[in-house]
Amino acid sequence: MTAIRTVLGDLDPAELGVCDAHDHLFLRSPLLPGQELDDVAAAAAELAAFRAAGGQAVVQWTPYGMGRRAAELPRLARTSGVHLVAATGLHRAAHYERLPELDSLAELFITELTEGIGGDGPRAGLIKVAGGFHGLDEHARRTMTAAAAAHHATGAPIGVHHEVGTAATEVLDLLCGQLEVPPGSVLLGHLNRFPDERIHLELARSGAYLAFDGPSRANAATDWRLLDVLVTLAEAGHGEQLLLGGDTVTAAARSSADGPGMPFLLTNLRPRISAALGEETAELILRHNPARAFAVDWKPVH
């Protein structure tokens, strides 16, 4: 059965609802000292605010080794009434004080997708990987090769962090060209941070999903271009490939602190999208596209 793998179990895609398709409830990185997302009460408050604004699902893109606190996610999902999807995968090497020593990345990803995170935690429903600034280093290629193997074994989608929105073409060449991952199973993230509409249109023609986050307080320089980018892609016939997320990566970015947080997608961006493209397109981007992007015909793994 085609299903979205949430931390409470597999879900009929029709039940996902309005979705923040790229965000973080918990995250820790040496690149963000003092701004860790590790407060369970603050995560619960953010989910409550998102739910009050009409949100029904959040996909947490925090991968292995970055403080994702997977064991907390089922309880947060139950108490908030918000569907949560967890991620496996690996970020850029710079986000780790020391890279984990693992015999097989692919085996780790497959285990977390099919058996659970940490042995007895919830199962992941997404593989998160990362490119570099205008290119792919050896670490990125190794991680993406493992992600492709895990995709072929399970069917799981692959979400890609693009550093400042760059190197998406190189990612597609590797994942889809060389490693034969279907473009419809690839989610290209952070594209709003490099708002070149010609490149976005080229990427859209590949068939991959295009994920735009905003505003994340730490990456707000191109927020003013976001709506124009969405309009261009939708009017070019690519509305069914667009995803939106808040990408809250620091404590200061939460709505309970000094940032827009998760509710901003629905309290600010949604009305602007509805005004520019119509309510039907807003529903497409926030409800129907995530339901397809994260839905998998999960393969049995032996």
Image: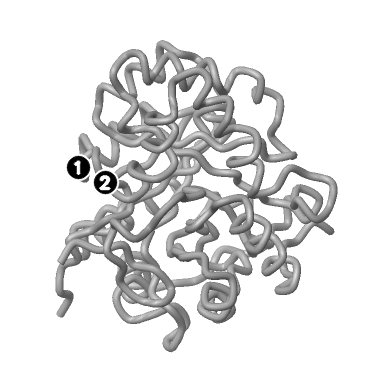
Q: Are marks 1 and 2 in contact (CB under 8 Å)?
A: yes
Position of 102 relative to 291 (above/below): below
> Residue 85 or 302: which is nearer the viewer?
85
Horizontal arrangement in the rendering, residue 124 relative to residue 176 (left or right)? right
Tell me which residue sits at (58%, 77%) in the image. Answer: 79
As helix, strand or loop, the secondary structure at mark 2 comes to helix
Horizontal arrangement in the rendering, residue 209 relative to residue 255 (left or right)? left
Point out residue 259 in the picture as x, y percentages from the top left corner: 78, 44
Tell me which residue sits at (64%, 49%) in the image. Answer: 262
Q: Which residue is mark 2?
A: 185
Tell me which residue sits at (51%, 61%) in the image. Answer: 63
The dot on residue 25 is: none
Point out residue 39 in the picture as x, y percentages from the top left corner: 75, 70
- For badge 1, the amino acid type reads Pro
Quarter holding the C terminus? bottom left
> Residue 128 or 298: which is nearer the viewer?
298
Mark 1 packing: few (<14 Cα in 10 Å), some, or many (20+)? some
Q: Which residue is mark 1?
A: 182
Position of 212 relative to 38 (above/below): above
Image label count? 2
Point out residue 97 in the picture as x, y percentages from the top left corner: 67, 62
Q: CA distance from mark 1 to mark 2?
A: 6 Å
- For badge 2, the amino acid type reads Ser
As helix, strand or loop, the secondary structure at mark 1 comes to loop
Q: Check the image and name the residue furthest to the top.
A: 198
Tell me which residue sits at (19%, 66%) in the image. Answer: 298
Horizontal arrangement in the rendering, residue 113 relative to residue 1 (left or right)? right
Q: How is the image coloured?
A: one colour
Quarter holding the N terminus? bottom left
Point out residue 146 in the picture as x, y percentages from the top left corner: 32, 58
